[in-house]
Amino acid sequence: MTFENHTVEKIGGTSMSRLDELVENLFKRDNEDKIYNRVFVVSAFGGITNLLLEHKKSDEPGVYARFANDEDDHGWLDALSTVAQGMRDAHKAVLHNPADLSDADDFVRERVEGVRNCLIDLQRLCSYGHFRLSQHMMLTREMLSGLGESHSAYVTTLALRREGINARFVDLSGWRDEREMTLDERINDALGDVDVATELPIVTGYAQCAEGLMAEYDRGYSEVTFSRIAALTGAREAIIHKEFHLSSADPNLVDGDVRKLGHTNYDVADQLSNMGMEAIHPKAAKTLRQADVPLRVTNAFEPHDPGTLIDDQPAETPGAEIVTGLNVHALEVFEQDMVGVKGYDAKILDVLTRHGIRIVSKTSNANTITHYVDAPLRDLRKVEADLNKAYPSAELTLQPLAIAAVIGRDLTGVSVLGEGLKALAAADVKVKAAQQTTRSVDVQFIVPRESLAASISALHGALIPSAQVADLKPGKKAA
């Protein structure tokens, strides 16, 4: 590999669907020297991974879910045909040359037919008693995931070559590759003969490897691939291109202006991830942090704006930086017998872990333990049933609430808790609970769900200095 003074950059699926704009705003540069010395890691076009797996928000089944659950072939076969049409629609929207469109159609046909034949063979194999389909489902999920990223990377390469850029399609998906490799080996093998000074590598966000990215990271795998490439190649910076700036609040929720963060650190990035507002997957952030690679989050469609730098530097002065929120359920266990009992909540944690429930926050006192969790209600009903069996004399309550969080690199001495409670009271928000940790990087206010937007607006108005804000509503640039 010939890598020196380069950046590794990632583009998300929603932005990829505007590839024709990205070609003009991001890939092409006024000075040809600035085109290269960059590595791009791309996600699938918007909506394609939902069709391949399941919808990220609604859980509507895609190919994977139908293949796992359908009693006949028609469900997943029809879903795979929908994927093929979705891919064709995606590249028709961004490719304009007939030859490129034909190449992209051929690519989709070859990959989709390959997946179709593989899944039919797997079903046939598992019709024998010695083989169980359940043992192969994670590998099936991995193969399907790679299909979306391979398509988008190939289409991006076609579009860039048409513009005279020496782009190179780098497929980490392991398609028809019988070799067993670790993630690092897969990356080194694929990038081994790349010269980033003269080539622009377009790399798939999914990487097939012995570790199995889906098993640990599920749909956060593209950022893990991205961060590992940056760490292995010694990137000068890792850059994530989004459709918006990382700002002090959602502009659609705040009554007033918000500001671009500009500079923050990995502690804040971790807190944002915990609140479901990922600047980057926490495992990917850890990789960059350990490799001493700074992260930059930019607006993909404002290429001259430096965006927000995320590194390990502390804040120059204490202060709140961002206000965000998340809908949660409060799972409360009350029992007088827990007073003085060590490890009383171990069984609660075991049940939550077994059902794959994500814990956002937790509080406890002498006889009550409350977990604020981010999970569908149907899964929490199963948890509730198991806990009722484990603690027959306890009182369990499950309540839909929300967390409004104020986050900053250093909140020491800012009185976020007190000022926040005053602001929420003035906005007529009835706070259910509030908490601040000793690390002083976030303060959480538990509020009714219907009050979340009002809470974020009130907290932002009270705690983000007005002199620092800039209008970042759609169509406006950061100051």
Image (cartoon, grey):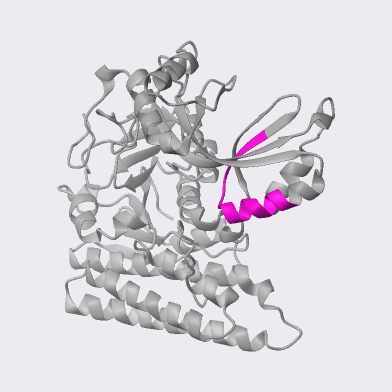
- Quarter of the picture containing the C terminus is top left
User: Quadrant location of residue 309?
Assistant: top left
Count all numbered tags in the image, as a single digit. 0
Q: Is residue 312 left or right of residue 32?
A: right
- Can you name the residue that lies furthest to the left here? 30
Q: Is residue 181 left or right of residue 234?
A: right
Position of residue 407 relative to residue 411, above or below, is below
Q: Residue at x 65, y 40 (%)?
A: 397
Q: Where does the image place residue 35, in percent across and percent down from the top left? A: 24, 51
Q: Where does the image place residue 178, in percent across and percent down from the top left? A: 58, 76
- Quarter of the picture containing the N terminus is bottom left
Q: Residue at x 23, y 77 (%)?
A: 101
Q: Is residue 8 magenta?
A: no
Question: Is 220 or 27 nearer to us in this picture?
Answer: 220
Question: Is 438 or 433 nearer to us in this picture?
Answer: 433
User: Quadrant location of residue 20?
Assistant: bottom left
Q: Where does the image place residue 256, in percent across and percent down from the top left? A: 25, 28
Position of residue 4 relative to residue 256, above or below, is below
- Can you name the residue that lies furthest to the top here? 413
Position of residue 80 relative to residue 448, above or below, is below
Question: Is 473 or 181 nearer to us in this picture?
Answer: 473
Q: Is residue 377 magenta?
A: yes
Q: Is residue 72 left or right of residue 369?
A: left
What's drawn in magenta, residue-wise?
370-385
Q: Residue at x 28, y 79 (%)?
A: 103
Instruction: Mark yes or no: residue 459 visible.
Output: yes
Instruction: Mark yes or no: residue 355 visible.
Output: no
